[in-house]
Amino acid sequence: MNEVRLTGPYGDWRDDLQSQGFAVVKNVITQEKAKYYQQKALDWLTSFNTPLDLNNPATWTVENLPYQSKVNTFNKYAVSHEKFMWEARMEPKVLEAFSKIWETEKLLVSFDALNVTLPNRVDKPAQKPWPHVDQSPLRRGLHCVQGIINLSQAGPEDGSLIVLPRSNTVMEQFLDTRTDPSNWKTKELQLISEDDMKWFQERDMKPLKVTAEPGDLILWDSRTVHWGGEPSAQSNTIRTVIYASYSPTEWATAESLERKRGAFEAFQATTHWAHDNITPREKEAYLPDGSLDPRNRSEPLEKPEHTEGLLQLAGVKPY
């Protein structure tokens, strides 16, 4: 089952990841690089020949935007395989951080989503909190560390990750005492109800919005209760982040690698997991009326160069 438990102290951000369930690794990419990646993301967002104008909030409407899930993420239109997404995933210090966690440089990466959150949209109410963890109750120990490559300011009023610090340290106790094992599933998602949140609050665990700067890497243990925090009415920041999770390639089964290869070749997004739970996202984008979006794309606008390093991270070529 590849169970891992961090055994610090390490004297660096891994101590926070172990004790608090999350960490912010500062300056993994330069401010200039962060601006570059954000601009590429915004260029992609405005590439669909609609009246969307990022300088005019009145145009920030559903009909002017590519299909977006209720949690502000984009994973259709082959965006997970755009050149800028792969460039960000392959940033040396991003890879270095995950290599430190797993103590190996032979990593796989998830084909994860892009998040662009436009603040104070007039046509869409703020997303309500939906606390959850991204690890099945059937797994114990540390199996997945999720990541956000932060490309915009995440201040107290801006959109950002919200976590329940230290919830990773009691998650197994919670599952064993508050949930019914007969209902446990292999699906790597466990929603935390409002009533269950009280259990954590009784243990002095309160929601915290993670603050970070452009170029920082936000990491969290998938057993940490978390959700995406919406910007407040005081924010004018367009939140722009790339989700990326890495894990040792040796953990992947032949079946998982075959599924990754299929998703890679079809330009499909997958889950937050890199080595397991390889569930390709539905590729086609549909409108609310159920019809195929005429803006649907089957390939990226800009394809990345298939270097040896990229193909190894994708699970297509062995190390």
Image (cartoon, rainbow, N blue to C red):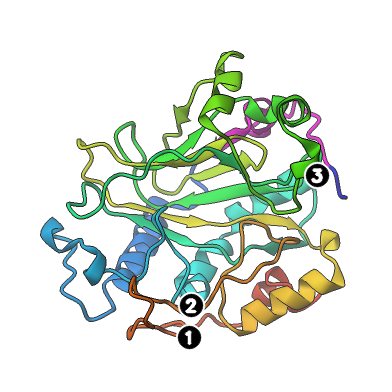
Question: Whole-percent x and y of residue 301?
Answer: 41, 83
In the depicted structure, whether residue 54 falls above or below residue 132 = below
Q: Where is mark 2, residue-wise?
A: 78
How far across and how far down the image is residue 192, in percent? 58, 35
First of labels 2, 3 by sequence position: 2
Q: Which residues are magenta?
A: 4-23
The local crowd at label 2, few if under 14, some if 14 to 19, many if 20 or more residues have their Cα within 10 Å, is many
Give me the residue at 27% from left, 53% from top. Answer: 118
Q: Residues within 10 Å of mark 3 (few under 14, many from 20)?
A: some
Question: Which of marks 1 and 3 precedes in the sequence?
Answer: 3
Q: Residue at x 30, y 71 (%)?
A: 43
Q: Nearer the viewer, mark 3 or mark 1?
A: 3
Quadrant where the C terminus is found in the figure? bottom right
Camera-near label (2 vs 3) is: 3
Answer left or right for 118 relative to 189: left
**Left or right placement of residue 119 versus residue 297 in this view:** left
**Residue 198, image quadrant:** top right
For the residues bearing labels 2 and 1, Cβ distance under 8 angstroms: yes
Judge whether residue 284 can be spotted in this image.
yes
Residue receiving disc 1: 299
Cα–Cα gap, marks 2 and 3: 32 Å
Residue 181 counted in the magenta span? no
Q: Is residue 22 magenta?
A: yes
Q: Which residue is mark 3?
A: 138
What is the number of the mark on residue 133?
none
SS category of the residue bearing label 2: loop
Q: CA distance from mark 2 to mark 1?
A: 5 Å
